[in-house]
Image (tube, grey):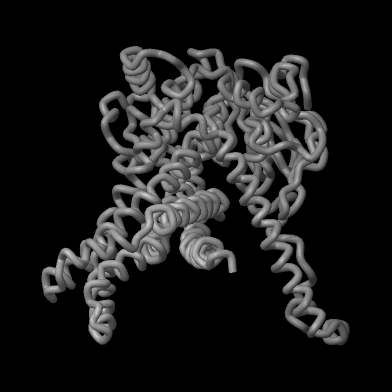
Amino acid sequence: MLKPSDVIKLTKVKFSYASGAIFDDLSVGFPRGKVTAVMGGSGSGKTTILKLIGGQIKPNSGDVSYGGESINQFSYDQLFRFRRKLGMLFQFGALFTDLNVFDNVAFPLREQSSLPEVAIRDLVLLKLHTVGLRGASKLMPSELSGGMARRVALARAIALDPEVMLYDEPFTGLDPISTAITGDLIRRLNNALGITSIFVTHDIKASFKVADEVVLLSRGQVTARGTPQELIASQDPFVRQFVGGEVDGPVPFHVVSESIAKDLGIPVSHWLKK
Amino acid sequence: MIVKTLSSLGHAIIDSIWRLGVASSFIAKVLTRSSIVLRRPQLLVDEIHFAGVLSMVIIVVSGLFVGLVLGLQGYETLKRYGSTGAVGTLVALSLVRELGPVVSALLFASRAGSAITAEIGIMKTTEQLSAMEMMAVDPHARVISPMFWGGFISMPLLAAIFSAFGILGGYLITVVVIGVDGGAFWSQMQASVDFYHDILNGVIKSVVFGFAVSSIAVFEGYSAVPTAEGVSRAVTRTVVTSALAVLALDFVLTAFMFTGGV
């Protein structure tokens, strides 16, 4: 599942949390300048991929690289230098609650650049204008709706003009209009800035509208990959079940467990008699 | 049964030692990334305001009442021996040696320590610390370090304010209300309270308590389980652990400072 054009590559990645293994042997790549959606059921390791790319966690084995440089081999300083090229939109925005909208967007500029305050002000207003919230610059995060908070967080994430944008569940908890606005912003930002965008989501409709390519994960493996049209046309049973949102299919309803007779304490002889 | 009990006891001990190790390495990390408080003093000023200035009301009021009670109790006891003039000495020594550092540290842990833990814990729960990391900003330097130093610097100042208001309370109740001679109150206090032996030792205690409470507060906040319940447990742990640490450290320090090497 790796191509030469991929700028971000996860090669033979093995990763597990204390609660269990997530990836056993995952290889997946993300092409430069494209919008890629990573989809899959809950617990399939979608967000873990973003954390591996951001260097927040390291694989147990295997390699995670950007432009040929191995992220998991970076020193502390190298990792922080690499992160200046990244922008990340967290699931619920993760805005700093003690700062207003303006100061939230100005935060990375003040921390990472030596620009004068006048230039920072102009840049912040431009970024807020991009997401349509220039008029909300004085509001506090507690005064924003979920969709607005997500857009402010997006303005903050693009403040330093990143090369890569990572979006963690950007559509969760949004109404249809906010979902459409967020999806449109992801697409427009990608086209305008030429960045590489990766987003993880469950939302089939929104993601198929925005993404150039979709990666479908299941049980720590890439089950399918292709353009939205290719996935819609796919005859693969898992893809059909996931895209169609069907109950019946290869993904079982029950979590793997002991037999019900054993759990209920009914002796096997009772069943044999029947 | 015995094996099980011993095993869980062993687990608890190993767990505590492991946690102490993690906390020590965390504090070492915070200390090594503290240059930011010199480069950007405004961050430190904000945290001194948060931990220190906002704790002033409870410190001033408690100090005043402790002084009032000490004055009353001291006067009633000393009256029997006809030495009510020494009440100033009693109030001052009790406060600068013991009650000032200890009670203000306990109040500081409840007011500021819990607030520091809650703020860091909530920042972790709402992914604000992760967001900062992803913006290539180190939260140890940007958030934790100023909070630690703000608490560490505030604590001795609050202890001094506590003792000062305690002495004022003692003065009010014994001299102004009861009518003990004011000259005797102040002169006996001046003659008996030694700057190095009493006041400086009290200051050293408050510095040690400041380090302990601030360390516990930032560590508990940072290591909180990122849920509402996790943060509430972390806040409780901050208050309980700080109180126990302050009382245990007070005993050790008192044994070294005031027992003449016995």
The answer to which of A262 and B85 lies nearer the viewer is: B85
Asked if B70 appears above or below B162 in the picture, the reply is below
Q: Is residue A30 left or right of residue B72?
A: right
**Res A29 → quadrant:** top right
Image spot of residue A80 (x, y percent): 60, 26
Image spot of residue B16 (x, y percent): 67, 62
Q: Quadrant of the N terminus of chain B?
A: bottom right
Say which residue appears at 78% left-offset and 74% top-offset.
B7
Say which residue appears at 49% left-offset and 60% top-offset.
B238
The answer to which of A268 and B194 lies nearer the viewer is: B194
Asked if B13 appears above or below A163 in the picture, the reply is below
Image spot of residue A110 (x, y percent): 42, 22
Q: Is residue A144 left or right of residue A71?
A: left
Say which residue appears at 58% left-offset and 45% top-offset.
B27
The answer to which of B15 and A160 lies nearer the viewer is: B15
Image spot of residue A244 (x, y percent): 61, 43
Q: Is residue B41 left or right of residue A215?
A: left
The answer to which of B189 and B176 lies nearer the viewer is: B189
Q: Is residue B182 visible?
A: yes
Q: Is residue B226 visible?
A: no
**Res A34 → quadrant:** top right
Q: Is residue B131 left or right of residue A247?
A: left
